[in-house]
Amino acid sequence: MTAPRLPVLSLLETRVLGVLCEKQHTVPDTYPLSLNALVAGCNQKTSRHPVIEASEAEVQAAIDNLKGPALVVESSGGRVTRYAHNMEKALRLPSQAVALLTVLMLRGPQTVGELRINCERLHRFADISAADAFLQELAARPDAAMVVELPRQPGSRENRWAHLLSGAPAAETAAASPAAAPSAAVTMDGIAAIETRVTRLEAQVEGLKSLLGKLCAERGMPV
C-alpha cells in the first residue's frame, strides 16, 4: 500500500514538523511538546537554516494545518496541550528516513557526509553509504519523491540533498549553501570594522585640522 499523497508544506510547517521530530530524541522527558516549547524550537538560532521568527499564533496555525494529513497529533489530558509528530505512520517511513528528513527540514540542503554527522542524535548511521542508501530510497519513492539531489556547485566536491516536502527548491535556495552563512557574517563584521575605523580616522583628521588652524593663527600664517 502506498502512502497518501502529501500536500505541499510551508517553511513554517516543515519547521514545526522538524522540531517535533528532533525534540523527540533530544529532550524525550518533555516530549510531546507544549506550544511554547514548539515556538522556542522553531525560533531557535542554532542548528537552523534559515533562522526564523514565528509568533505563537503562526505556529498554532501550522500545527492545525499539519493535523489534516495526520502529520501532527494532539495529546489529551493534563492542563497543557501537547503535540507530537506522526511521520513514520502518516508517510510510512522508517525512522532512518525520518531522521534524514528532519535534518534537511531544520538545516537546509546538505551533503551526505553532513547529513550523517547532523543526524547523530536522531539516528547513528554506520557510514556514509548507509545514509546515502536511505536518501536514494526517499528519492525513488514510487508515489512521490521526498528528497532530491541538487546539481553540484562550482568548486564543490560533493552534491547536496534537499527535501521536497515544500515542493521543488527554488533556484536561489538550491544555489545557496548554509555553509556560506559564516562567510557572509564575517564579511558583514569586516565591513562594520572598516566603517568604525574610517569614523575614527575622520575624527583624528578633524582634530589635526583644528590644531593646524590654531598654530597658523598664532603665527599669522594662512591655513
Image (cartoon, helix red, strand yellow):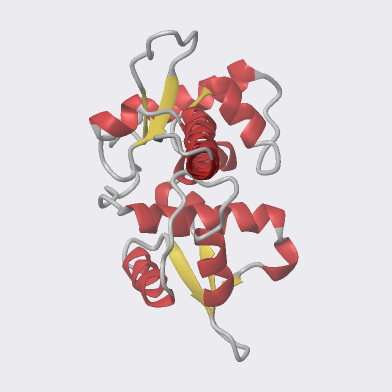
Position in image of residue 160 (x %, y %): 44, 22
What residue is shown at x 42% (from left), y 54% (from top)?
A: 90
In the figure, 111 relative to 70: above or below?
A: above
Q: How many marks?
A: 0
Name the quarter where the N terminus is drawn.
top left
What residue is shown at x 33% (from left), y 25% (from top)?
A: 175
What residue is shown at x 43% (from left), y 26% (from top)?
A: 161
Q: Is residue 170 left or right of residue 50?
A: left
Position in image of residue 147 (x %, y %): 38, 32
Q: Is residue 148 left or right of residue 51?
A: left
Q: Can you name the residue that lies furthest to the bottom here?
A: 79
Q: Can you name the residue that lies furthest to the right here?
A: 29
Position in image of residue 17 (x %, y %): 46, 56
Q: Where on the picture, by quarter, is residue 117?
A: top right
| Residue 90 seen in the current view | yes
Name the quarter where the C terminus is drawn.
top left
Position in image of residue 61 (x %, y %): 34, 72
Relative depth, front residue between 158 and 85? 158
In the figure, 187 relative to 160: above or below?
A: below
| Residue 102 seen in the current view | no
Q: Where on the picture, by quarter, is residue 176?
A: top left
In the figure, 172 relative to 217: above or below?
A: above
Q: Is residue 145 left or right of residue 104?
A: left
What residue is shown at x 39% (from left), y 35% (from top)?
A: 222
